[in-house]
Amino acid sequence: MASVSFKNISKKYSEDVSVIKGVDFTIEDGEFVVFVGPSGCGKSTLLRMVAGLEDITGGEIHIGGELANDVHASQRGIAMVFQSYALYPHMSVRQNMGFALKMAGRPKAEIEERVGKAADILQISHLLDRKPKALSGGQRQRVAIGRAIVRQPKVFLFDEPLSNLDASLRQNMRVELSKLHRELGTTMIYVTHDQVEAMTLADRIVVFNGGVVQQVGSPLELYDRPANLFVAGFLGAPKMNFLQGKLASGSAAITLPGDEHLPAAADVARGTAGRDVTLGIRPEHLRLAEESDAAALQARVTLVEHLGDQMLAYLKVAGIAEDLCMKLPGHAVKLSYGDQVRVAFPPQQCLLFDHAGDAFPRIQ
Amino acid sequence: MSKKTNARNAALLNLLTWALVVLTLLPILWMVLSSLRNYSDVANGNQLDFSEPLQWQNYRDMWINVDFFNFFKNSLIICSISTLFATISATCAAYALARFRFRGSSSVSVGISVTQVIPGMLFFLPLYMLYRNIGESWGMPMLDTYHGLIFLYVALFTPASIWIMRGFFVSIPRELEDAAVIDGCSRFGAFVRIVLPISAPGIIATATFIFLLAWDELFFAWTLTSSSSVQTIPVGIRLFIGQFQQRYDLMMAAATVSTVPVLAAFFACQRFFVKGLSAGAVKG
């Protein structure tokens, strides 16, 4: 096990092309950390820099307290699982799993023992003599993980390892990865653009955008207290509803273009009344209100999606460009296209973001 | 499209395919038939006269009339060594072009393809003068030598081979090499231990391709060599046509015999050949 710290890490491909900009944080021993962000945000590049597959333009990476910038990939004590599995097609599963140990000059008996042990953990002992082409996608992914386990690394690196699997297999593998982390207790860094993977697997999530860390925190912390509009919009499906308006004077509330006031439990001391702000509320926090509720907004149902246990209703509110999405229990209420409803915004669940997109602190 | 139309189209395509196969095989059939007829039959165009029995005499006489074994040996030496060097240089160059972006890499790529649109014969005069000057100035004879032809063939067949190999290397996921580096290989180690074994079908296909080209090459082999100790089969076969006698029967027998090794090589490597040349089309 080892910690991994990033000290002002940057990566430039040329003077104009900068993909990582001053990344600074530490991953603790045995932690499962997920890097998440949209395509091209630099999360995979940072992982490859940890692996030693990309040069570091500036800053320092420490693995287990030791500076790793100029250490060869094989000497860093890491193992990596790739999106495409990257199994050597001309080698059997056994040879694939034992290749790193063979390269390190370990005795045959030790290689056999460690390969056997990893195969037992992943229940792939019966596949050891097969070639990768004779394996299914899920089996290939297990072998790729097995190849990493065999090395007994200090840090596991996963680069979107489940992206090539179908939905049900992906869910199974997600559970297995969680169990594996509990069993091995090794530091794991996992890159994905799938927020469900991020939320379910991570001890902590690091959200990237444009080569900059947007927020680091536990999944629920990021979900409930996003630092900015990007994090708020990126985590959660369907995504958070955003309403543009002005900061009301004298209270923590937004004034919408139609002059409606929506209060939020936020500390707006640093805000200036009348400036642009955004109110964010998650679909599951919107409520259907009584006709008499003066604080609620009038809305028209434009679409209803039934997901079985849940229902998503899309609502058009006059003066708000984007439809609001409301998540309700599957059979809670009967809604259909064209229905007129009133929708309430519980202040405790509303977030306020300033004109720059940074969140005002929430008040419990 | 209806089932009936589909079936008709399939039948037409089948017919076309068979017509092409027959068209391709016809000269070979003609060559084999001619090699089994005597001098006058061939001269009179009686290859299809099956009232006369087939005779195998030509396959004995061809070795006696001309020192054919010598040409055979020269071809084997020159083509094998040329194939070896051209394959090695094409493999390395193709890998570099497929994997690395370096200053001038796109110019190199364009340069390689440009060499393919210039007819080889245009190189003859400058090449001949170059070879002669090297011999005269540096005392290293290039004309009428094994190494002169080998050097030429390597230079001649490497560019096309680079293009075949490049497609193959591009289709190999880069992550395999990354995995090998993490497993303890250097970049070169990853190339040798991972990329080369995976590319074996492509390399074998390319080598076969180069060998076939070199084996059939007549123009340079004829113009850059003058003694039978260096000349190759295509040149040797021409010797059956003399000033007073044109022994097409023996020529056909010699041509048939010279086809056997390349045909054998082709069939032995056929699965690699098909796999190798089609690689790169689909990312695996």
Image (spheres, coloured by chain):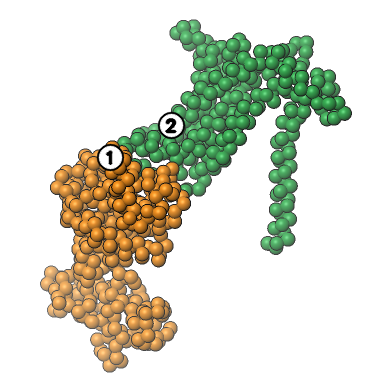
Is A344 or A316 nearer to us in this picture?
A344
Which quadrant of the figure contains the N terminus of chain B?
bottom right
Q: Residue at x 24, y 74 (%)?
A: A279
In this view, B215 is above or below A151: above
What's the residue type where badge 2 is placed?
A: Ala
Q: Is residue A221 left or right of residue A90?
A: left
What's the residue type where badge 1 is placed?
A: Arg
Identify the element where label 1 is drawn: loop
Q: Is residue B104 left or right of residue B26?
A: left
Badge 2: chain ID: B
- Which x, y percent locates residue A14? 29, 42
Residue A128 can be seen, yes or no:
yes
Quarter where residue A264 is shown: bottom left
Q: Residue at x 74, y 32 (%)?
A: B29
Badge 2 local density, few (<14 within 10 Å), some, or many (20+)? Answer: many
Is B105 or A160 nearer to us in this picture?
A160
Q: Which chain is orange?
A: A
Badge 1: chain ID: A
Residue B217: mark: none
How far, Cα to Cα, is label 1 from label 2? 34 Å
Q: Which residue is mark 2?
A: B93
- Which x, y percent locates residue A132? 43, 49
Residue occupying the far right of the picture: B51
- Which x, y percent locates residue A44? 30, 52
Q: Residue at x 70, y 13 (%)?
A: B64
Q: Is residue B236 left or right of residue A275?
A: right
Badge 1 local density, few (<14 within 10 Å), some, or many (20+)? Answer: few
Look at the image and give the colour of chain B: green
Q: Is residue A197 left or right of residue B129?
A: left
